[in-house]
Every structure is written in C-alpha cells, then in structure tokens.
Amino acid sequence: MLRKITGIDAYPAIPGLDPFLVSYVQDLAHFPDAGKALPRFSGPTLLLNGENDLETPARAALTADAAMAAAGNKDHRVVIYPGMGHTMNVSPKFADELGEPDQQVINEVQGWLEAHR
C-alpha cells in the first residue's frame, strides 16, 4: 500500500525531475548493491563513511563490512567518521554539504594504502 501511495515505483520517471539526476539514478541502478557484491571480493577492502552521509547511510558500510567478515575476508576495515557527510567533510546532520575531504580521511586512506603496498 505504501508503494502505491508514494508512487515510488515510478521513480525516476517523475515529471519535472532534472534530466541529469534521472540519468544518474538509471546509471546507478546498473551496479550491484555493495552489501551483496563485496562478500564475493576477497581482496583488501577499506570502507569509509560519514556519519551524516545522506546518500550512503553509514549502516550500509557496516552491513557490507559484516557481510565481508561472514564471507571469510580477513582484510577489511570500516571507518565511520562522526559529523561528516558524503564528501567526507564536516557537515550538519540532515544537511549534507559538499566540501573538501577532511585531512583525517586523507590520512586514513594514505596510511591504509601504504600498509597494503
């Protein structure tokens, strides 16, 4: 009933929706869900997520990490950054603001890459 009331099945074919957004959403639909795809990957994996990320909620990274552990991947790590949004910068909750990545995130990625050379 909720699907019928909201019309969610018509998305992204909503009249007046920005054509770029429609194209982006349609393209995104071609990729598998990370929680389903990552367990099949056995290589080193670093999952980074902002706590305030509206596009990719932190629970998705936690779910993907747990799925990798359950699949037997021994080299995976998840980091949830408090107060950060989608572009890994400090962002107010429920107002994901674009910005340059925080230095803490850059340091984390550099350290992880160096450890996995």
Image: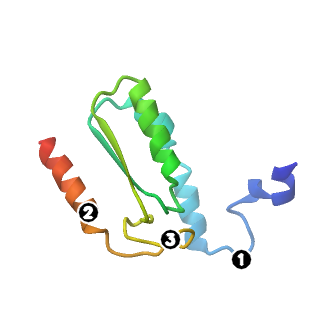
Binning the other alpha carbons within 10 Å of mark 3 as few (below 14), some (14 to 19) or many (20 upward) gives: many
Q: What residue is shown with label 3?
A: 96
Badge 3 amino acid: Asp
- The image's mark for residue 59 is none
How much space separates mark 1 and mark 2, taking CA atoms? 39 Å
- In this rendering, the answer to whether 46 lies above or below 43 is below
Q: Secondary structure at mark 2?
A: helix
Badge 1 amino acid: Gly
Binning the other alpha carbons within 10 Å of mark 2 as few (below 14), some (14 to 19) or many (20 upward) gives: few
How much space separates mark 3 and mark 2, taking CA atoms? 18 Å
Please provide percent x and percent y for residue 78.
36, 44
For the rendered model, the colour scheme is rainbow
Is disc 1 in contact with disc 3, using a CB cutoff of under 8 Å?
no
Badge 2 amino acid: Gln
What residue is rendered at 39% in x and 28% in y? 69
Please provide percent x and percent y for residue 36.
50, 35
Query: Which mark sits nearer the N-terminus, 3 or 2?
Result: 3
60 and 21: which one is in front? 60
What residue is rendered at 43% in x and 75% in y? 98
Q: Secondary structure at mark 1?
A: loop
Is residue 35 rendered to the left or right of residue 114? Answer: right
- The image's mark for residue 16 is 1
- In this rendering, the answer to whether 3 lies above or below 64 is below
Please provide percent x and percent y for residue 101.
31, 68
Q: What residue is shown with label 2?
A: 104
Closer to us: mark 3 or mark 2? 2
What residue is rendered at 49% in x and 63% in y? 52
Query: Which mark sits nearer the N-terminus, 1 or 3?
Result: 1
- In this rendering, the answer to whether 79 lies above or below 17 is above
How much space separates mark 1 and mark 3, taking CA atoms? 23 Å
What residue is rendered at 12% in x and 48% in y? 114
